[in-house]
Image (cartoon, helix red, strand yellow):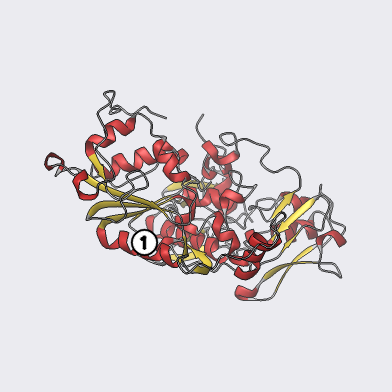
Amino acid sequence: MSKTITIDGLTVPFREGQTIMDAALSAGVYIPHLCHNPEFKPHGSCKLCTVNVNGRNVASCTLPAVEGQQVLSDIAELNAERLALTQMLFVEGNHLCPACEKSGNCQLQAVAYYLGMMSPHYNHFYPQREADASHPDVMLDRNRCIYCELCVRASREVDGKNVFGLSGRGIKTILAVNSASGLLGDTDLAVTDKAVQVCPTGAILVKRRGFTVPIGQRVFDHLTIKDLQTGGGHE
Amino acid sequence: MSEQSDRGPLPIPLPPVGEGEVVSPAGDAKKIRIATCSLAGCFGCHMSLLDIDERLFGLIKLVEFDRTPLTDIKHCGPCDVGIVEGGVCNAENVHVLKEFRNTCKVLVAIGACAINGGVPAMRNNIDLWECFQEVYQYEGGLDGGQVPNDPELPLPFDKVHPIYEVVRVDYFLPGCPPSGDAIWKFLTDLLNGREPKLDYEMLHFD
């Protein structure tokens, strides 16, 4: 007899040890998220996946599912907060979609579309951030980094290399590269590494592959991120 | 993407242009007045507005253009809708933008530049003087070049800003540029008194 929780009134089964996010993804229920990737241990930093569980707001990617939890997710109040968080991500970096090779395949952009973001709303920081083109095959553009640590986790846990890390605190946080020079070209990062593949934005890109897919055929041109991540979608 | 039923098949003459207030004959008193401008933009959004193609003929029955690059009217009269392309990169942009806000009941930011600074904002992380030197002095083929310094030139800002950081904006129409279909959907919603709403495939930031 499997245990269940309810999400927005829908009964969702879960196995012992699964988080609310795990249970939702298994059941095809979309909870917006950016720093979570089911292949990796939860990070719980972007807070987009915040849901209301028995009256309290918690990150669904880190909270274990427990029998009988009443979860609210797709409600106006939480979606408004998700939109505000997404807008803050846009203004605290330099996210200029028309000039970005990831546009159309970018999860940050796709979440913004899903939430109906018509403007970034807040005043832009236009922060000074460094790009790093020293690696022969991989481009690192920190202007687009949202500090999800997916590359950090992938490099440590899958590639066994420990190439990336977050350094500094708060608004001064930067994505640091683990080499004496601080340059990506002086690490043992390979273009085939998992760390290169997991970036949800255009911060880490494989060189010489920009704009290879025409507009209209990119991942999110027709499918919403909800369609993609829950395996649903329309034709 | 559905075809719009109210595409006007009958071309009617465009109103006379370029003569300021005489553009508005008495019979047009009930027409919606629209003003448009391009600040720190590339006029791509205006080109996309023209991409509504023959629907322009239907549109012109409902609206009348005040200050726009199409009419060459230099200053806004009282308008119902102001559509602003481009971000704010110099002092003149601010004057134009404030004129639009003061004379237009509804102000619309159209395109990536008006909404987040867009491609011109890519200079925000470059020192302005270094940027000018690169463009006017160091670029090849510019022997003896100097940075333009005529007093009539507007004062450039060290950073390019979206228009909502300067004035209140009522609606945003993202895209670089938004497609003609997106602009048409937006305008027809607005003119019909509906809250403008773009379909998923019409909403894009690039």
Q: Position of residue A232 (x, y in %)?
A: 53, 36
Quarter holding the N terminus of chain A is top right
Q: From what the image shows, is residue B174 above or below residue B144? A: above
Q: For mark 1, what is the residue? A: B97
Q: How many marks?
A: 1
At 52% from the left edge and 59% from the top edge, which residue is drawn?
A: A48
Left or right of B100 in this view: A21: right
Q: Position of residue A32 (x, y in %)?
A: 52, 52
**Chain for mark 1?**
B
Residue B19 or A224: which is nearer the viewer?
B19
Please, what secondary structure does the residue beneath circle 1 have?
helix
Residue A217 or B186: which is nearer the viewer?
B186
Q: From what the image shows, is residue A167 above or below residue A216? A: below
At 69% from the left edge and 75% from the top edge, which residue is drawn?
A: A168
Left or right of B206 in this view: B130: right
How packed mark 1 is, by other alpha carbons closer than 10 Å (few <14, some 14-19, many 20 or more), is many
Residue B130 or B200: which is nearer the viewer?
B130
Residue A147, located in which quarter of the rendered image?
Answer: bottom right
Left or right of B24 in this view: A88: right
Using the rendered image of the protein, determine whether residue A145 is visible from the camera's viewpoint: no
